[in-house]
Image (cartoon, rainbow, N blue to C red):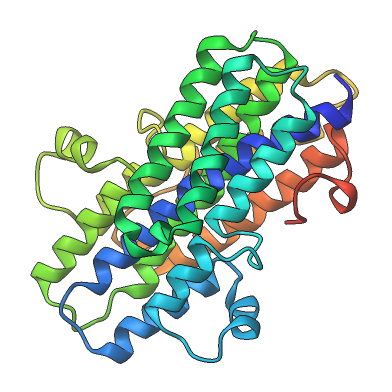
Amino acid sequence: MLSRLADHLFWMSRYIERAENTARMLDVQLQASMLPGEASSINEQWKTLLDLNDLQEAYNKRYAKLSSDKVLRFMLADNSNPSSIISCLERARENARAVRVVLTTDIWEVVNNIWLEARAMVKDGGFVKDPARVFEWVKLQSHLFRGVTIGTLLKDEAFYFVRMGTFLERADNTARILDVKYLMVQDDLEERADFYFWSSVLRSVSAYEIYRKVYRDSFTPVRIAELLIQRGDMPRSLMACLDELLVNLNHVSSPGRQKALKQAGRLRSTLQYLTIDEAFQEQIHDFLTQFVMQVNELGVTLSHEFLVPLETSAGPSD
């Protein structure tokens, strides 16, 4: 497949997945901000969210003061922020339009309608009036996109690059969502409030029912980390993302193009042989930070090996 076509397909799916995961991350923080706590502590949590997404500098250029309303607007509907949900949906549509000849009619109509509906909601103010409803809408549209892709697209190289974009982006964002928890929880947070925070984190990655089914007891940091990092049967875990990424990379790799495949394999091995216990809690932030860096490095390798170099690609540099 031509690298330009592969690049558009890869970034189309990454932007759809990024919009969904941004919605999930904001949903966690919005629920957390409703728990008992000092206003200064809540503002610090919103600041942490910006830091984790490397958006603090961009936010400061746009707004003079930190507030939950401004952060929500910045990450939901601000076109000046390339990682906002509205920006991601617009870029997904631009990439899809560039490869309409490769996509099925169903996929194009879904991506195009998502953008048209999102633009209409921004225009009438609905995107920021009821953010919780928007988060659910974005998640449902992302599910629809993936379902139509799996159900209508020929399982050829186009399909493999779409899936690689999805799972590379999901691995990055699941790590960030989990890291939000470990940076936000205050030492003096009430146990009951902590329970609700863990619940919101699990719900944000559609893992609440899965946790109850697998562990059948109260939430513990170690088991939540194990579920979201190491369990391959948990669909949004880091391990599951790397498994899917390797499957699709295998289909497009050849004897002369295996650098990304080997890099992904090493990263998966790190997850497989990781010991997650009480001692790991002290190291989890460093581990997740390193994991995000390695995922970004893998994205760069993948770009140079199969796609358009990032400086001229349809997506942003990592």
Q: Is residue 220 left or right of residue 22?
A: left
Return the x and y of residue 72 as percentages of the image width and height: 43, 69
User: Where, by quadrant of the figure, is residue 138 drawn?
Assistant: top left
Return the x and y of residue 82 as percentages of the image width and height: 66, 60
In the rendered image, the quadrant that contains the C terminus is bottom right
Is residue 262 visible to us here?
A: no
Above-or-below relation of 226 to 176: above
In the rendered image, the quadrant that contains the N terminus is top right
Residue at horizontal 25 percent and vertical 64 percent from the top: 31
Is residue 88 visible to us here?
A: yes
Residue at horizontal 57 percent and vertical 17 percent from the top: 106
Residue at horizontal 65 percent and vertical 58 percent from the top: 293
User: Where, by quadrant of the figure, is residue 257 drawn?
Assistant: top right
Front one among 293 and 22:
22
Q: Is residue 201 left or right of residue 81?
A: left
Residue at horizontal 55 percent and vertical 48 percent from the top: 18
Front one among 183 and 13:
13
Return the x and y of residue 168 as percentages of the image width and height: 61, 40
Return the x and y of residue 61 as percentages of the image width and height: 65, 84
